[in-house]
């Protein structure tokens, strides 16, 4: 059979496996090297202790006749959906508009089925690569034909929307991966107005919303007037509760959101969810429900504070070393302008000299060239060790 031609248009490796490959090559040559990974944004601290009994209890129930349950509702357990609404979107959305899933990444992939391959797409540049790669895989367009919204320090990482032609789908990630920038009320209002004017659908990825520390910043697109008519929001327990391995996330599709012909997206998303997906793990959902109880919320705040202290340690270090560094205040990522222009060369430099793994900015798009992304997820001792290595190798 012929290869799917759209797959041939992708870079051969997804960004993070490419980094993992380079790490293996380095370790094969330097087996005793003690590498520090500040590359992939993966949580490192234990899941809060108040969540664990709920996971264990559900597991034990599954081992009893009375407590066993099989397939759950495709859209997710009602109680969990209600808690997501109460805790994170009070008065903004209804439980029926929340769809529980096994991860935001999977949701981004399934959204492509909702959009089909005829839609025009705009993404930020730099961007989380999954919006682009999944668009290319479904044959929406060649990645080069996507509309790129350049986000750099000069425009405060927010594109000039007046320069953009009308598009069907606009992906926007805030707090941003990779730049760490968190959009203001004013900026999100501009986005919503743009989407309204052009009848675009805004896919608002809020995977890092929990990390917003500055109280004046919006934590959801639905904090913006009119957003229910234009925006889908994605949220995830991955970084909030340390669930990157447990797998639990959600998407929100408001009932007001319609296609050109007036048909509600909600209905089609429900259809796709129940056709392509059999519901998130019941164990994970029990964990998610515990995470949204008062003790869980408190513990998740502490977890965030811990990681953001890491971010501050790294940020201060880069500033002391004289680099321009962005992010790290409302997102667990630092976006560092490195004195080596080529991001992959800078990546190799840090790997060779400091045994530190980061993510090359160019892996997120052309506008990321010259930058490196550092994840603030790590044990405190690891971050402290990274700080002293960075001081030790400071390139001139
Ligand atoms: N959305 C954004 C913006 C992300 O950065 C990530 C993870 C996800 C969604 C995925 O969320 P899940 O709910 O866990 O599926 N980004 C990490 C991990 C790498 C990856 O390939 O997803 C990162 O380092 O960018």
Image: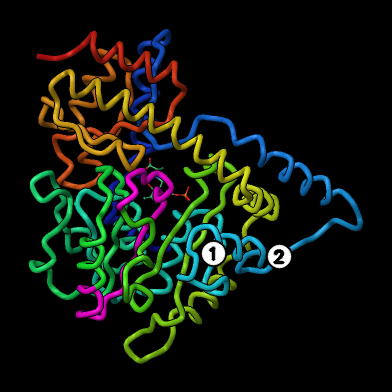
- The boundaries of the magenta stretch are 193-216
Residue at the image position 28 percent from the left and 19 percent from the top: 351
**Secondary element at image label 2:** loop
Residue at the image position 10 percent from the left and 30 percent from the top: 341
- Kindly indicate the quadrant of the structure image that contains residue 299: top right
Residue 198: say if magenta. Answer: yes
User: For disc 1, does the CB lie below 8 Å from ligand 1?
Assistant: no
Tell how many labels: 2
Residue 261 tag number: none
* Picture coordinates of residue 184, whole percent (x, y): 25, 56
Neighbours of disc 1 within 10 Å: few (<14), some (14-19), many (20+):
many
Name the image quarter holding the C terminus. top left
- Asked if residue 23 can be seen in this view, the reply is yes
Neighbours of disc 2 within 10 Å: few (<14), some (14-19), many (20+):
few
Residue position marked by numbered label 1 in the rendering: 85
Q: Is residue 108 left or right of residue 79?
A: left
Labels 1 and 2: the sequence-earlier one: 2
* CA–CA distance in space, label 1 to label 2: 20 Å
């Amino acid at each position: 059979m012929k290869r799917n031609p759209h797959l041939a248009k992708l870079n051969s490796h997804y960004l993070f496996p490419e980094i993992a490959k380079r790490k293996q090559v380095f370790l094969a040559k330097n087996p005793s090297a003690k590498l520090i990974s500040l590359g992939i944004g993966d949580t490192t601290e234990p899941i809060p202790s108040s969540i664990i009994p709920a996971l264990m209890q559900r597991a034990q129930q599954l081992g009893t006749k009375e407590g066993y349950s099989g397939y759950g509702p495709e859209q997710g357990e009602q109680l969990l959906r209600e808690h997501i609404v109460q805790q994170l979107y009070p008065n903004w959305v209804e439980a029926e508009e929340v769809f529980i899933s096994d991860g935001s990444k999977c949701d981004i992939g399934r959204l492509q089925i909702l959009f089909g391959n005829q839609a025009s797409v705009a993404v930020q540049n730099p961007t989380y690569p999954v919006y682009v790669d999944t668009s290319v895989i479904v044959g929406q367009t060649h990645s080069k034909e996507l509309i790129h919204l350049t986000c750099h320090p000069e425009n405060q990482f927010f594109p000039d929307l007046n320069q953009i032609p009308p598009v069907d789908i606009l992906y926007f990630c805030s707090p941003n991966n990779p730049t760490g920038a968190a959009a203001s009320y004013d900026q999100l209002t501009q986005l919503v107005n743009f989407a309204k004017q052009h009848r675009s659908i805004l896919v608002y990825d809020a995977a890092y919303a929990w990390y917003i520390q500055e109280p004046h910043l919006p934590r959801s697109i639905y904090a913006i007037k009119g957003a229910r008519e234009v925006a889908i929001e994605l949220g995830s327990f991955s970084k909030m509760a340390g669930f990157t391995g447990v797998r639990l996330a959600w998407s929100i599709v408001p009932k007001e959101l319609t296609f050109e012909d007036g048909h509600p997206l909600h209905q089609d998303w429900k259809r796709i969810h129940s056709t392509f997906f059999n519901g998130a793990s019941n164990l994970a959902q029990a964990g998610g429900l515990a995470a949204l109880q008062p003790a869980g919320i408190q513990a998740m705040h502490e977890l965030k504070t811990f990681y953001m202290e890491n971010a501050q340690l790294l940020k201060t270090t880069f500033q002391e070393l004289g680099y321009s560094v962005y992010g790290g205040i409302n997102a667990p990522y630092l976006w560092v302008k490195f004195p080596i222009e080529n991001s992959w060369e800078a990546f190799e430099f840090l790997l060779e000299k400091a045994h530190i793994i980061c993510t090359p900015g160019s892996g997120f798009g052309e506008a990321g060239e010259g930058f490196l992304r550092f994840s603030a997820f790590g044990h405190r001792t690891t971050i402290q060790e990274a700080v002293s290595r960075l001081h030790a190798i400071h390139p001139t």
